[in-house]
Image: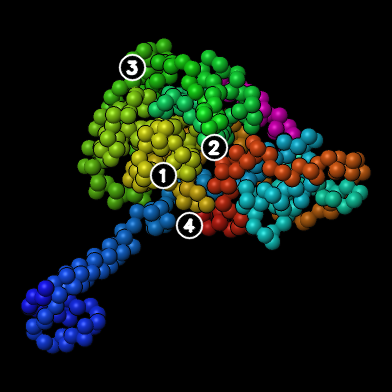
């Protein structure tokens, strides 16, 4: 069926000249379905072009943020910890070896963990910390890497500190389980937070069995291992904000977790003055009540104001458990389902910039609890953080390359150790935990740090 349709501006309605229509004519005869198709197509093109230009100019991605919005001091803190984790990973790798020595060529498999792309040599990376690592050859000319006496003493010191902090780490893991929906979490996911909570390297094999009154290991039908809560402790169902502002202690914490109305501490850097334009929205958010992270949140509607504020409270509580008051954002997204968190977690973190700060340096982003930092330094440093800073102080070397000595007593171990190139399961679990921390190339560490200091 054909209809006569008058088109005011036929050049706009007809995108193509498929019908060989003369646009100068004032009246066109078209099939009604064809006309509708072209009109809708034209409208779609206009809307698509508008949305593309809008998303490019108003993007909320972290990568698109201006350099003026970055917190210089916290970027320095990110840089410092990234360098530290490269060295700590190598120390942990040596600890897995029977004699705490390993052929350098066996370290080639860990290039991704220390972010050392070819053609850079692993031996050159090791040479940069002569106070921590030693290089020597056996009679066959095989190059080996080991620890210095100073590093061995630091390893013993760390083991003692982890043992002293074990009870506190067990409390944080238990409270982590108490915040989850089903009161259990996959062990593989908890392993991502091993360094952040101060857990030992072999925590899955031994440490989890030291606290049977708190949690236990269980296996699901698909053979996945879970850490499950054994008993609920009402004294631990108290947020760090309640402990800080209301003086609630374990002896007085007998209430059932429910609604809270405590404001979150805010800390804006000096270059965030324009944020005060949104003071009204910030005050409204701070006064809004929210559900405790330890309360059952399955009834909350995703996307609601109550849902989002409770997610902020969960993030605040989880960051308070960590030693450095910072976490890798990718690791947080693993727990969205277990902790009842929004899918677009990054958007939530960026929105509440006075509470959190997201650093984009490296392959993966890190989120800081801003109240815990004064400049680039943590306000309260636990013993393990002080230990990491001691290790970091020994990194770096500006002298000439020394001749690598040859030792005779190493050759007997070569045949036993060369077969260790297969990935250790515990180090595999830490793969994700290290790669995001070690995003700098060994030859660009000093350059990028200088850029930060001169910025």
Circle nearer the viewer, 1 or 2: 2
Regarding residue 382, the answer to whether it shows in the image is no
Taking depth in this image into account, of 40 and 439 the one nearest to the observer is: 40
- The mark that comes first in sequence, 3 or 4, is 3
Range of residues picked out in magenta: 151-168
Disc 3 to disc 1, C-alpha distance? 31 Å
Disc 3 to disc 2, C-alpha distance? 30 Å
Regarding residue 417, the answer to whether it shows in the image is yes
Query: Among all residues in the image, which is located at the extreme front?
Result: 1
Disc 2 marks which residue? Answer: 192
Label pair 1/2, CB-CB below 8 angstroms: no
* Residue name at image x 56 percent, y 31 percent: 223
* Residue name at image x 40 percent, y 32 percent: 339
* Residue name at image x 46 percent, y 15 percent: 231
Residue 256 - label: 3
Residue 357 - label: 1
Residue 455 - label: 4
Disc 4 to disc 1, C-alpha distance? 18 Å
- The mark that comes first in sequence, 3 or 2, is 2
Circle nearer the viewer, 4 or 2: 2
């Amino acid at each position: 069926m054909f209809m006569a349709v008058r088109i005011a501006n036929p050049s706009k309605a007809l995108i193509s000249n498929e019908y060989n229509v003369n646009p100068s004519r004032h009246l066109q005869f078209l099939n009604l379905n064809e006309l509708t198709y072209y009109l809708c197509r034209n409208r779609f093109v206009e809307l698509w072009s508008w949305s593309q230009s809008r998303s490019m100019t108003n993007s909320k991605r972290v990568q698109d943020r201006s350099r003026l919005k970055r917190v210089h001091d916290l970027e320095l803190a990110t840089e410092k910890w990234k360098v530290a984790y490269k060295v700590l990973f190598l120390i942990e790798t040596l600890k897995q070896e029977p004699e705490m020595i390993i052929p350098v060529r066996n370290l080639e498999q860990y290039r991704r963990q220390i972010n050392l792309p070819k053609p850079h040599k692993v031996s050159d990376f090791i040479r940069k910390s002569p106070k921590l690592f030693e290089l020597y050859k056996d009679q066959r000319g095989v190059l080996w890497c080991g620890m210095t006496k100073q590093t061995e003493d630091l390893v013993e010191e760390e083991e003692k500190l982890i043992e002293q902090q074990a009870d506190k780490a067990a409390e944080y893991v238990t409270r982590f389980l108490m915040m989850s929906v089903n009161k259990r979490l996959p062990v593989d996911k908890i392993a991502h937070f091993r360094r952040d909570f101060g857990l030992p390297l072999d925590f899955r094999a031994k440490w989890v069995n030291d606290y049977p009154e708190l949690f236990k290991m269980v296996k699901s039908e698909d053979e996945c291992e879970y850490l499950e809560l054994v008993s609920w402790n009402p004294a631990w169902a108290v947020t760090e904000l309640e402990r800080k502002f209301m003086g609630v202690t374990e002896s007085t914490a007998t209430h059932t977790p429910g609604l809270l109305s405590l404001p979150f501490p805010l800390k804006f850097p000096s270059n965030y003055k324009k944020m005060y334009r949104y003071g009204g929205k910030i005050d409204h958010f701070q006064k809004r009540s929210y559900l405790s992270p330890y309360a059952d949140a399955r009834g909350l509607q995703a996307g609601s104001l109550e849902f989002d504020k409770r997610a902020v409270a969960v993030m605040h509580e989880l960051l308070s458990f960590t030693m450095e008051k910072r976490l890798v954002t990718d690791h947080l997204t693993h727990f969205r389902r277990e902790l009842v968190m929004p899918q677009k977690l990054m958007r939530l973190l960026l929105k509440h910039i006075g509470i959190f700060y997201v650093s984009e340096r490296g392959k993966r982003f890190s989120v800081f609890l801003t109240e815990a930092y004064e400049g680039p330094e943590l306000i309260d440093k636990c013993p393990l953080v002080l230990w990491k800073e001691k290790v970091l102080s020994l990194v770096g070397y500006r002298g000439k390359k020394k001749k690598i000595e040859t030792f005779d007593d190493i050759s007997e171990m070569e045949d036993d150790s060369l077969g260790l190139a297969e990935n250790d399961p515990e180090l595999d679990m830490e793969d994700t935990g290290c790669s995001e921390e070690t995003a700098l190339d060994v030859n660009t560490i000093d350059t990028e740090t200088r850029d930060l200091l001169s910025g």
